[in-house]
Amino acid sequence: MRLPVKALGLIAFLLNANGDLFAQDEKGMAQSLAKAFVGACVQIMPDLDRVETGAKVLGWKELTGDMAQMFAPAERNATWKGWLVQDAALVPFMLGIARGNESGKKISVCTVVNPYAPVGPVQTALTSILALKEPSRTETSAGQRTQMWLTSVRGEEAAVSIVDATPMNDPGVNLSVMLIQ
């Protein structure tokens, strides 16, 4: 799932966050966000039902209506759910899961988004936690830079990606993991 980072400012008021949070402890908050992504997404792949169950048990606020439509994947055949998560890390974030099929293969995606997170410190934390080396792919399109690493999750190849809008001088980060079976 690839969300336009520029649009993330629209959820800022729902997240009850502001850029000052990261100014207080940029490294600690970036580490916390990266750990939340690894724990809520990477480590559970491809069992997205566990994310849904966790969301219910922990009382995460489900995105509905226009907000859900805005963050839904472009692929019309994919099923998607998303939540505002305010207590799983030092900073709030949006978490979304998507399921789909392409060419007979099952696709599972889990994404964490924060409109204020500084990409550099989050990327440093994420690559350290997951022991990622150089990205296998980097591209810039429409003012957003995407970096992707191929890694193993539960013995299967998965793609971990970071999308940021720093080429447009906008903050915010989109962390995703995708597994194709």
Image: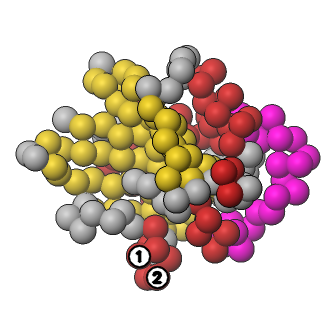
Q: Which image quarter holds the N terminus?
A: bottom left
Q: Which residue is mark 1?
A: 69
C-alpha separation, residue under disc 1 versus residue under disc 2: 5 Å
Q: Tell whether 170 sits left or right of 78.
A: right
Which of 135 and 30 lies nearest the eye of the viewer? 135
Q: Amino acid at mark 2?
A: Asp
> What residue is drawn where x is 63% and y is 54%?
165
Residue 108 sits inside the magenta stretch: no
Q: Amino acid at mark 1?
A: Gln
Q: Which residue is mark 2?
A: 66
Majority SS type along the magenta span:
helix
The relative height of residue 162 versus residue 69 in the rendered view (above or below) is: above
Instruction: Give residue 121's mark.
Output: none
Q: Which image quarter holds the C terminus?
A: top left
**Picture quadrant where residue 130 is located:** top right
Provide the secondary structure element on which disc 2 rests.
helix
Q: Is label 1 in contact with label 2 (beta carbons under 8 Å)?
A: yes
Magenta-drawn segment: 11-32
> What residue is drawn where x is 24% and y is 37%?
180
Mark 2 Cα shell of 10 Å, populated few (<14), some (14-19), many (≥20)? few
